[in-house]
Amino acid sequence: MTGRDETVESGPREKCGVVGVSLGERPAALPTYYALYALQHRGQESAGIVTHDGFQQHDHVEMGLVGDAFDEDDIEALQGSAAIGHVRYPTAGSVDKSCAQPFTVSFKGGALGLSHNGNLVNAASVRDELAASGHAFTSDGDTEVIAHDLARNLLEEDLVRAVKRTMNRIHGSYALTISHDDTILGVRDPEGNRPLCIGAVDDGYVLASESAAIDTLGGTLVRDVRPGELVVLHEDGSGFDSYQLVERDNTAHCFFEHVYFARPDSTIDGELVYEVRRELGRKLWEESNVESDVVMPVPDSGRAFASGYADASQEGDGEGVEFAEGLMKNRYVGRTFIMPTQEARERAVRLKLNPIRSTVEGKSVTIIDDSIVRGTTSNQLVQLVREAGAEEVHIRIGAPAIVAPCYMGIDMATRDELIAAEQSADEIAEQIGADSLSYLSVDAVTEALGRSRADLCLGCVTGEYPYDIDGETTDRDVRRPTAGADAPADD
Ligand code: AMP
């Protein structure tokens, strides 16, 4: 590793969606496909499904969106009532099928499939050790590292002990769905950094990154997978077993899931994302209100913030600020964030967003977005809205300033690219031509989430991480496994 801003050790940062399905009789491929559709926002680079029919594993993994990656025949060919699925987030420079998932391995102990959301911080050292003992790797991703480690352990231990051994070996963030022959497992890292939940459907059980996927299947959210827990779905779809394999004193849930990444209609770790965003919007009003004529969201993720902001404003003594849809989004434009050049990113913001003149002309407007990363979106929006006749433009952000990279699975940017790493809110406002710019405080985030700082990963906004990362500051004693006897307990 040459600098602080590189991906931790090797391998791409993977911000993805995972699914696991175990049904009594019915083929699991179609529900897995629908669940992946519901998680499309978590990854657009590739989509894949692995099934097992009791005798044989089947897989289909393609680059592109879920709707393009599979046709009817593909789904038909994916036989068996056990399945896992994956959608992969595009990360700069890695548009390579070798990183597409689920990852599969066939070995003496059976057939393994693995879907991973997250990022290991010690993948390189585990990889070196496995390579030294004869394991050959085909990709540079950390998912393959987990798959090989697990396969090795499965040759020596039963399933539960093998998973526990792997969990004690790997560090970092991981929400995993695993198929071992026709048994489907869900594993969440001991800090619960990335989300994973369990749902019940008519004839079986489902694991998914977000509860919206369970809703899509007409199922019911049972609960979140607990940090450090292994969930084993019964092959006949009748239930699941739970094993608390690793315990920590604190969690490190990613606050950015609630701010930006997750769907607003998902419930993550007991909180409905939409309500958290509305609460963050209310706090934004309390902390840095400005009596403009209208408040308008950057669609889509700014909507809940702006509605909370407008509501809070109308509860005060003054008239309050009217909520308005002042920016229209062209939904066919991909994420501006991943465009390789700055010019392309700027063009993409204009392709994606266009102001409604009557909402902004002659008015003082407040624009709410969920975050500022490089500053491209805010910069372009200020110009666009001014061109459409706005008199004053205020920017409010539903998250604290992002000052440091994410090593835990969100492809954010390097420190050099983060506009807030070196500049204050006032300096940025001046640079982008806004009348004012304010972020939310870290305390507002912890209050809205109802969790203490010690239970959240706030690394990108504090520069202090709950993991031991080379060249970065740790915000607590880096926790190693403290519990979990050799014989795992059922519950
Ligand atoms: P920027 O334009 O670089 O300041 O990025 C901020 C915009 O990108 C906001 O509108 C966010 O909604 C969005 N955004 C924030 N984080 C990410 C991410 N990890 N991937 C893609 N888009 C993001």
Image: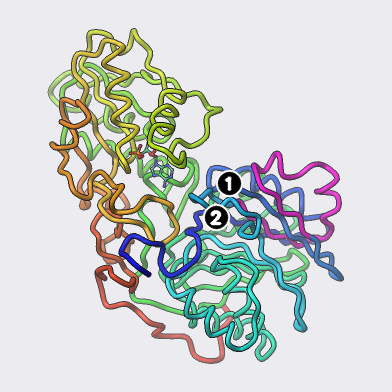
Q: Are marks 1 and 2 in contact (CB under 8 Å)?
A: yes
Question: Is residue 13 on the magenta stretch?
Answer: no
Q: Amino acid at mark 2?
A: Ser
Q: Is 66 inside the magenta-drawn segment? A: yes
Q: Position of residue 377 (x, y in %)?
A: 34, 32
Residue 368, compared with residue 465, is above or below; it is above
On the image, the x and y values in percent for residue 489 come to 55, 84
- Give the residues in magenta: 59-87
**Residue 473: image tag:** none
The x, y position of residue 390, in whole percent, is 24, 13
| Crowd tier of the residue under label 2, counting other residues whose Cα lies within 10 Å: few below 14, some 14–19, many 20 or above | many
Question: Which residue does the numbered mark 2 point to in the structure image?
Answer: 209
Left or right, residue 149 beside residue 379: right
The residue shown at (67%, 56%) is 85
Q: Find disc 1 in the rendering and name its residue.
A: 39
**The CB of the residue at mark 2 lies under 8 Å from ligand 1:** no
Q: Secondary structure at mark 1?
A: loop
Q: Nearer the viewer, residue 439 or 46?
A: 46
| Mark nearer the N terminus (1 vs 2) | 1
Query: Hey, which quadrant is residue 293 in on the image?
Result: top left
Rendered-image quadrant of the N terminus: bottom left
How many marks overall?
2
Residue at point 46%, 39% (across, down): 339
Quadrant location, ligand no. 1: top left
Q: Residues within 10 Å of mark 1 (few under 14, many from 20)?
A: many
Against 329, residue 80 (above or below) is below
Q: Is mark 1 within 8 Å of ligand 1?
A: no
Look at label 1 and name its amino acid.
Answer: Leu
Query: Is residue 445 shown left or right of residue 86?
Result: left
Q: Could you give the CA–CA distance between mark 1 and mark 2, rounded to whole angstroms?
A: 8 Å
**Residue 8: in sight, yes or no?**
yes
- Above or below: residue 448 compared with residue 480: above
